[in-house]
Image (spheres, grey):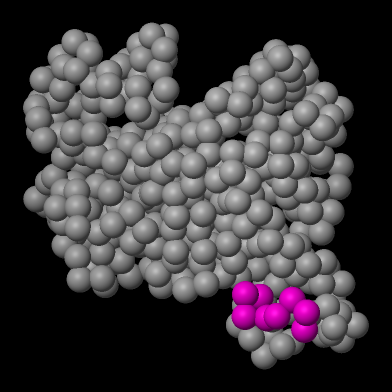
Amino acid sequence: MAKARLVINDIQKGVYDEIFKTLYWTDEKTASHQRGRYMSAIESFERYYGADRDIAIYSVPGRVELCGNHTDHNNGVVLASAVNIDIIAVASKSRDGVIRLRSHGFGREDAIDLERLSPDRREVGKSSAIIRGVAAAFRDRGGQYGAFDAYTTSDVLKGGGLSSSAAFEVCVGSILNGEYNEGRFDAVTLAMIGQYAENEYFGKPSGLMDQTACSVGGTVFIDFENRESPLVEKVPLDISSNGIYLVITDTKSDHSDLTEEYGAIRAEMESVAAHFGKKCLREVEYGDFLSGVADVRESAGDRAVVRAIHFFEECRRVREAVSAAKDRDMPRWLSIIGECGHSSFEFNQNAYCVKTPERQGIPVALAVSEAILGRRGACRLQGGGFAGAIQAFVPSDLLDEYCGAMRRVFGGGACRVLNVRPRGGIRIL
């Protein structure tokens, strides 16, 4: 830790430019922006919590799911990447038994009494629930936990499928891990702590993929067969060296109120598994399922059947995508990602919400994308789906045309060109 004023002076002198380059792939314009962003966060911390305190700084990236849409919650496999947008937190330990946290753009402060760590129904869907749940998870795992003051700011798009909630969860966990546990909890454990807080306190039945990708960093293959100890493997994926850009387009449709729709996907997949006496689809043999489709239709319904087919085929595509990445076969990799996108739309059926069929921002974005890219790139819905954002892999010579078209449809700030971030959640200072 260091005094806040000294950290600001070091940022101005460029002391942190190398780590910024690692995290954000900076040119000078981006470096200048990040210097200003970090200094502003420190100054905001001082305004709320006192001048020139000893501070630590944490950074946790957002993520993109590349392949494996809605497979993690049924113990499947996924391929995901951390990206160069993040939440940063300026934090300082305190001694009054309360975690206090303010976030840029939110008018309120979360204040969590560490003597009261049971779930509070009044907090469902609120950031305070996440903080309380993360602290409780450290307690239950035999870790140390204690009070701190923190100020956070984020450029991870909320409601855009880039895992703003998972980044926040891992960020709170990283602060407790760094300030009270000397970093002894590894990245995957921090991810599981974040998932616990989201499931049991925040009230969202998420899988574990979001938190793992944010926490571990880089591009990762994750196998959730053993949910208590998922297999995580770094995958060499360098799309930029192939002249391909990752573009995220925000369709300006917030997906934060779609918990019921997300939960239905998991529940329907599990209902198919239950037909075979299993808890999740990973435990069901694909051949047995195909042989019994007629009976499954009767017991679980047709949508559950096609969502189960998506699960089985999506897990196959994930493994093929990992193989293509290791072989540096970008045309094959892009083709697999395109297949993933079509399966999510057609079989998993999470491109839009059937309750509001007049709102189809994601299908519009995908249709425009395919019209421009043809077979030269790939596109798919981003994250949980139903609303939010899409991702596209765009050849360099089509980048201006593509981004221009998407901005005309969805507004001037709709597109963001991103890179894979090699580092997950880290303590910068």
- Which residue is at 86% across, 80% downward? 293
**234 or 371, nearer to the observer:** 234
Q: Quadrant of the C terminus?
A: top left
Nearer to us in this view, 397 or 9:
397
Q: Residue at x 69, y 48 (%)?
A: 385
Q: Is residue 94 left or right of residue 171?
A: left
Q: Does residue 82 appear to the left or right of 256 in the view shown?
A: left
Residue displayed at 50% across by 58% down: 222
Q: Quadrant of residue 328?
A: top right
Q: Main secondary structure of the magenta part?
A: helix
Q: Is residue 46 in the magenta section?
A: no
Above or below, comparing residue 201 to residue 217 in the picture: below
Residue 161 place in picture, x, y as percent = 59, 43
Q: Is residue 402 above or below residue 221?
A: above
State the image coordinates of residue 231 (x, y, percent, origin top left): 44, 64
Q: Is residue 118 visible?
A: yes
Locate residue 376 relative to residue 14 in the image: left or right.
right
- Which quadrant: the N terminus? top left
Q: Residue at x 59, y 66 (%)?
A: 76
Between 113 and 267, the one nearer to me in the picture: 267
Q: Where does the magenta region start and end?
A: 281-288
Q: Residue furthest right?
A: 294
Give percent across and percent down for residue 230.
44, 66
